[in-house]
Image (cartoon, helix red, strand yellow):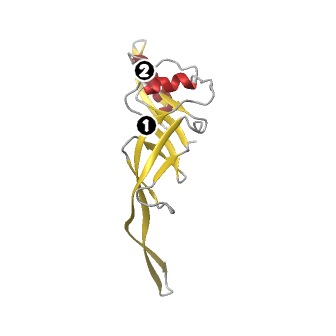
Amino acid sequence: MFFFFIFLVIAHGGHKRRAAISVRQAAKRCLTTVSTSSSAAAPAASSTHDAIAYLRSQPSHYVVASLVGHKYLLAPRDLLTVAHLRDVRVGDRLRLSEIHEVGSRDFTLRGAPMLPEGLVGVEATVVEHTKGAMERIVKFKRRKHYKKTVTHKQGYTRLRIGPIQLGQPKEQIPMQSIEL
């Protein structure tokens, strides 16, 4: 693994010396500094019910959901462009079932790897089916007088993300607290 190092000049004992720290160590120092300087720390949730109750008290939410094999960070009223979805029409409503994370500005609830079904509900409405820009694929073999050009437009589906609904958990799941 290739590591980058940050060199800092540290005044120690009247003379200066250089100390090399990795980017990961510098990020940890920054994160711990930021998290301790926060005036209103989020309460530790002992169960999913407490976490959902705390999330409901927050003004805005986001989710990380999987759709067509890719993860997307979504918020209400977002316009999402994905690869063409067959068997859906304009105006259809899709319910996103694979939700990995839900959060707000101060609190995040993560699944391992996904949150239980029914805990968070997100719907997306199909806005349009469209095509991308014209792409040219050139196939060429040197010294053989072979050149072939193929043009292609990729199909896309655009989705409008609806409101994020936080439901009740079916069973109480104990939470783990992770410190940075």
Q: Which residue is mark 2?
A: 33
Q: Image point 57% across, 19% down: which residue?
A: 46
Helix, strand or loop at mark 1? strand
Circle on res. 121:
none
Q: Image point 51% across, 62% down: which residue?
A: 87
- The amino acid beneath tag 2 is Thr
- Between 4 and 109, the one nearer to me in the picture: 109
Helix, strand or loop at mark 2? helix
Circle on res. 62:
1
Q: Earlier in the sequence, mark 1 or mark 2?
A: 2
Q: Is residue 19 left or right of residue 127?
A: right
Q: Image point 58% across, 30% down: which residue?
A: 169
The image quadrant that residue 157 belongs to is bottom left
- The amino acid beneath tag 1 is Tyr
User: What is the x, y in percent for residue 20?
Assistant: 48, 29
Q: Image point 44% across, 38% down: which residue?
A: 164
Q: CA distance from mark 1 to mark 2?
A: 25 Å
Say above or below: 112 vs 49: below
